[in-house]
Amino acid sequence: MNNILYLPTRYFPAISGAEFYFQRMAEILTSKYNYKIDIYTSNAIDFKALRDPKGKVLKPDNKLFHKVNSLKIKRFPINYNLSENEIYQRLKNIESFNSLNLSRECVTKFIKNGPYLEDLIKFFITSNEENYDLIHTTFFPYFNLVICLLFGKILEVPTICTPFFHFSNPRYSDSVLNKILSKFDRIIACTYIEKKILVDKFKIQNEKIDVIPMGVDDKIFRSNRKMQTNHYKFKEHFFHEKEKKFRLILYCGNKNYEKGAISILKSIPLILEKIKNVYFVFIGPSSKAYNRELSKILKFKRARIINFTPDNLTGYYDKKKIAAFKEADLYLMPSRTDAFGIAFLEAWAAGIPVIGARIGATPEVIRENIDGLLVEFDNPLDIAQKVIKLIKNKRLKKKLGLSGQHRVSQSYTWDIIAKKTHNTYQNLL
């Protein structure tokens, strides 16, 4: 049995693709491949809490604090009280940290991003029980990457990072931050485009990078018409009686500019000029910019918009979310900040077509005119035209959805991804 340590930035009930990826890998690898996986993470729930005490954190009395499904979790509080200089000086007192040869500028930037987990570092250094064969962290550019390298150096074991590198977002082009990636023994990239960027632009050795995509529990999202009478129905609960035959356009993710949510809002009046009977469903945490734009669009009387936040949902498999995917006409996420986009897989598993942005890794994930369509990032007119095209062309909509569904079942289930991850681990061990 191999002992593995996972060091994610956050863990469920924190929700994003990176958290879900680690959760499913840990659950499958322990149950099917006989690994022992410990999970050390912060107590943060939202991104704000990673560096701001005003963010949401999970308290020890919550039933999910110490255990999620079959896995035990160790969550450590984030230290907000020390300055960046104080933190750096404390790290410099650790001999193994100095041997990492990270510049002060690099470390300071990671400290600023958070989460600084001093209690975790002290626990690991002083504990005589921790003995791991490999340490795996995610995601870039947060301080847990520094912690992973530090622990790997202390134990003299291999380190892996799945950075979810959003290379089309300008914030990720910082060469000072990117130097840390070359320190890992292995990088897992989600796409070959991501690997090419890491090799060509940031000079990571080609042989250090394995390409392993994201996955989906496809059977959960797959529609079963014979069983629909017993299943939760989204339209029945949220559409007015006379509107149950209206179209449903779905978005799922952080509601911000980077993910394309604000661009979708701006496209709604254009869409409604051609398609009047439609609802737009947004699932995910809101941003101030999104709320400002939403207030403008809601003044447009024909705009029908349903909003869900994590507070309205019970988790990744929330019945409202799954029903929305099953009943949607199309999935729309014109993002520039996805290393892959698990929600595309969830949509395909449900047999619906997707629309993404022609930027970053998405053109590798979505095969244009085969299982989805691509639009220019932050172009509401282009978004509207592609949505209208799919809604009005039932044959194309069905073709793209079924093509994606078949592709998911053959290449993108979590079991397939876990097997590839197992092979990466064994190559290092």
Image (tube, rainbow, N blue to C red):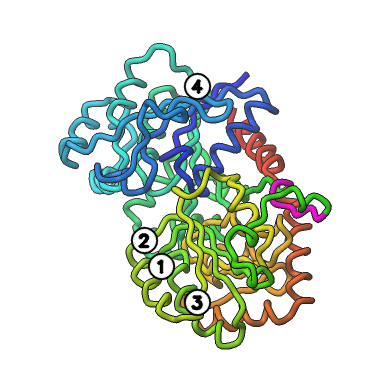
Amino acid type, callout 3: Ala
Disc 3 packing (10 Å; few <14; some 14–19; many ≥20): some
Is residue 152 something one can see in this rendering? no
Residue marked by disc 1: 257
Residue marked by disc 2: 287
Percent of width and height locating residue 164: 49, 51
SS at mark 2?
loop
The residue range painted magenta reads: 219-225
Marks 1 and 2, how far apart at CA: 9 Å
Amino acid type, callout 2: Ser
Give the residue at x 27% y 29%.
118
* Circle 3/circle 2 CB separation < 8 Å: no
Percent of width and height locating residue 421: 63, 38
Give the residue at x 43% y 46%.
181
Marks 3 and 2, how far apart at CA: 20 Å
Amino acid type, callout 4: Tyr
Q: Picture quarter containing residue 333?
A: bottom right
* Circle 1/circle 2 CB separation < 8 Å: yes
Marks 4 and 2, how far apart at CA: 39 Å
Percent of width and height locating residue 29: 64, 30
